């Protein structure tokens, strides 16, 4: 069995309660950090661990902590990003629901490291039932002296607040999240200044993903070096993968980074293979925004090496033949899936979720959706394919936040790898627009 | 369908809840309470009328427009009256791969309404939403705080029957 840093006890009955979590060794890392370490030493362990942002960006968490400005007399904030909304991604939902104290414990350690006395967990509003679970866990931790004033007699105070969102994917972008937390529309801010200098209430702020923070108890208990020894290269530690689509065992799995895509997809420990009688056609490895790859390129790199579940291996070949680990939203498509329809669906998502602040994204996402809709529904022309590529290029890199890129990549990659399928829709409009119609032309299935 | 809007006032329990929410934030940052308080308001009235939004604005010492711009930005807030049960149906890719579109068609036919509409008996409002972060258990819809997962036509029958009682 592979090492489990986050999910070892996730199926233990009662693990959502303080007592059971404590019996399983919970909150020992808070005791160790607060009683025996300085905040700087905690930051040092995070740096040594090499743990990278698990929300999708993959930026080293310890380094991000290192950027936090510390002017005298100004409060600092830690905000946990639990606005999980990227299609294909449901790991944080699962983790918070099943083992809420893990995140609470991580928040206490991380807040202590950053010198924050008031920290927030911003949870997407749809997960109100999870918010109630977290609030209950916070009450328990407070009653046991792990939160509130003078934690464990150390003189350190911490208040933890769970903030609901209102249903907006854009609030997963950290500056949009901060705007939302201030009670405003989720319009991303221009950077610089970065949140580490001017974040929540114009104070220095760190925003980290649920999974990133949930690694901290293990890192403190075992040391950053031990964490860094797990995984492969600069992809240290483990990663939660949300697996969905045409597989036998959809769900959330914790993998050691560096497991091969082949093993993750086909072994019974994880996805259990593509559903019976079907074949792999395409795969989105890191949430809807990362480039979709055809079967042969997701299993092997262009150089013929086994593709691994790591930041580096998935991006091998750049966007020409590679993709990204992203948030770990692993969406599997068998031969019954229509790539054009799915691309239209994703583009509708990004159009719906664009905040409307930057024109390339506001106008471009709607335009791409419209063009894809007409191709899917039998009204496309050959010119539309190049038009889509053109629009996507004009959005990419031209917006304040990465939503523009996230909208452009799925469209550009679908055309890059499945152009024949788009052409078939255009040359066979009647057939292609029938419900359930799927291109049956030549393609490499695995 | 919804409680009387006049006069607009939170129930005593919700008033306490609102006070507790406002107290969470640093002095002068009560605007941060806006999203959570709007959720409490929607819990009470089912939707956010301009009277309700104005009331929330006064509680938080905000201009009414500061509330309107937020309530219209976030998709969870209902700006029109809704039925007793609002079905928020996920229309995003991974759910569709699991047959989400077919089940959605069945649900619409069963209720005799389209997205954005309410059944004549006022029992159900149908709303299309984007990804609910439950893709491994799709197709999915949500009614208030509850997720209904791995939906099939048969499950839809059961759920609608149960909620129609």
Image (cartoon, coloured by chain):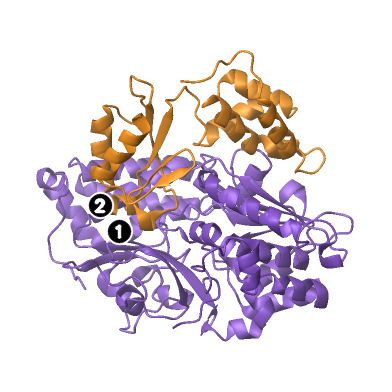
- Seen from the viewer's position, the closer of residues B124 and A304 is B124
Q: Chain of mark 1?
A: A
Q: Secondary structure at mark 1?
A: helix
- Chain A appears what colour? purple
Residue where numbered disc 2 is placed: A340
Q: Are marks 1 and 2 in contact (CB under 8 Å)?
A: yes
Residue at figure coordinates x 62%, y 50% from the top left: A122
Report the side of A99 relative to A104 (left or right).
left
| Mark 1 Cα shell of 10 Å, populated few (<14), some (14-19), many (≥20) | many
* Sequence-first tag of 1 and 2: 2
Left or right of B47 on screen, residue B25:
right
Residue A167 drawn at (x, y percent): 51, 42
Work out whether residue A254 can be spotted. Answer: yes
Query: Exactly how many numbered labels are in the figure?
Result: 2
Quadrant location of residue A278? bottom left
Q: Secondary structure at mark 2?
A: helix
x, y percent for residue B24: 75, 43
Q: Colour of chain B?
A: orange
Quarter of the image where one finds residue B105: top left
Vertical arrangement, residue B126 with respect to residue A415, above or below:
above
- Chain under label 2? A
């Amino acid at each position: 069995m592979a090492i489990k840093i986050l999910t070892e006890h996730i199926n233990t009955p009662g693990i959502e309660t303080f007592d059971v979590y404590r019996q399983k060794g919970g909150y020992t890392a808070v005791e160790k950090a607060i009683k025996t370490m300085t905040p700087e030493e905690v930051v040092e362990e995070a740096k040594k661990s090499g743990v990278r942002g698990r929300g999708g960006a993959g930026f080293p968490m310890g380094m991000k902590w290192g950027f936090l400005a510390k002017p005298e007399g100004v409060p600092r904030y830690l905000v946990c990003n639990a606005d999980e909304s990227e299609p294909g991604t449901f790991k944080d939902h699962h983790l918070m629901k099943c083992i809420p104290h893990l995140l609470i414990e991580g928040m206490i350690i991380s807040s202590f490291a950053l010198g924050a006395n008031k920290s927030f967990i911003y949870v997407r509003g749809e997960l109100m039932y999870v918010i109630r679970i977290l609030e209950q866990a916070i009450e328990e931790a407070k009653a046991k002296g792990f939160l509130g004033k003078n934690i464990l007699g150390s003189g350190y105070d911490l208040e933890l607040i769970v903030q609901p969102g209102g249903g907006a994917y854009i609030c997963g972008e950290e500056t949009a999240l901060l705007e939302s937390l201030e009670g405003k529309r989720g319009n991303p801010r221009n950077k610089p200044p970065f949140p580490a200098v001017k974040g929540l209430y114009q104070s220095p702020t760190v925003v980290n993903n649920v999974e990133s923070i949930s690694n901290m108890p293990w890192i403190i208990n075992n040391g950053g070096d031990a964490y860094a020894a797990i995984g492969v290269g600069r992809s240290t530690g483990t990663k939660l993968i949300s697996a969905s689509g045409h597989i036998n065992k959809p769900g959330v799995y914790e993998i050691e980074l560096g497991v091969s895509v082949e093993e993750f997809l086909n072994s019974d420990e994880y996805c259990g293979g593509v559903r019976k009688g079907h074949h792999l056609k395409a795969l989105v490895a890191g949430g809807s925004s990362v480039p979709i790859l055809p079967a042969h390129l997701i299993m092997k790199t262009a150089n013929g090496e086994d593709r691994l579940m790591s930041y580096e291996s998935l991006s091998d070949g750049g966007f020409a033949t590679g993709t990204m680990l992203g948030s770990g939203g692993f969406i599997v498509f068998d031969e019954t899936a229509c790539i054009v329809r799915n691309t239209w669906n994703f583009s509708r998502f990004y159009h719906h979720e664009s905040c409307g602040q930057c024109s390339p994204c506001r106008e471009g996402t709607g335009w791409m959706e419209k063009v894809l809709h007409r191709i899917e529904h039998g009204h496309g022309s050959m010119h539309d394919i190049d038009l889509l590529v053109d629009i996507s290029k004009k959005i990419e890199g031209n917006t304040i936040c990465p939503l523009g890129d996230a909208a452009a990549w799925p469209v550009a990659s679908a055309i890059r790898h499945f152009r024949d399928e788009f052409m078939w829709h255009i040359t066979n409009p009647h057939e292609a627009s029938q419900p359930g119609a799927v291109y049956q032309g030549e393609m490499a299935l695995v | 369908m919804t409680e009387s809007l006049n006069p607009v006032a939170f129930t005593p329990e919700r008033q306490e809840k609102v006070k507790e929410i406002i107290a969470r934030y640093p002095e002068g940052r009560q605007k941060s309470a806006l999203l959570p308080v709007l959720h409490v308001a929607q819990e009470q009235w089912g939707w956010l009328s301009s009277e309700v939004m104005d009331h929330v604005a006064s509680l938080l010492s905000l201009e009414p427009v500061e509330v309107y711009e937020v309530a219209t930005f976030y998709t969870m807030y209902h700006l029109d009256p809704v039925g007793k049960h609002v079905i928020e149906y996920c229309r995003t890719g991974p759910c569709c791969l699991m047959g989400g579109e077919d089940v959605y068609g069945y649900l619409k036919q069963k209720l005799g309404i389209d997205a954005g509409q309410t059944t004549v008996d006022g029992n159900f409002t149908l709303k299309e939403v984007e990804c609910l972060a439950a893709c491994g258990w799709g197709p999915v819809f949500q009614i208030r705080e509850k997720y209904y997962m791995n939906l099939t036509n048969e499950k839809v029958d059961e759920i609608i029957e149960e909620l129609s009682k």
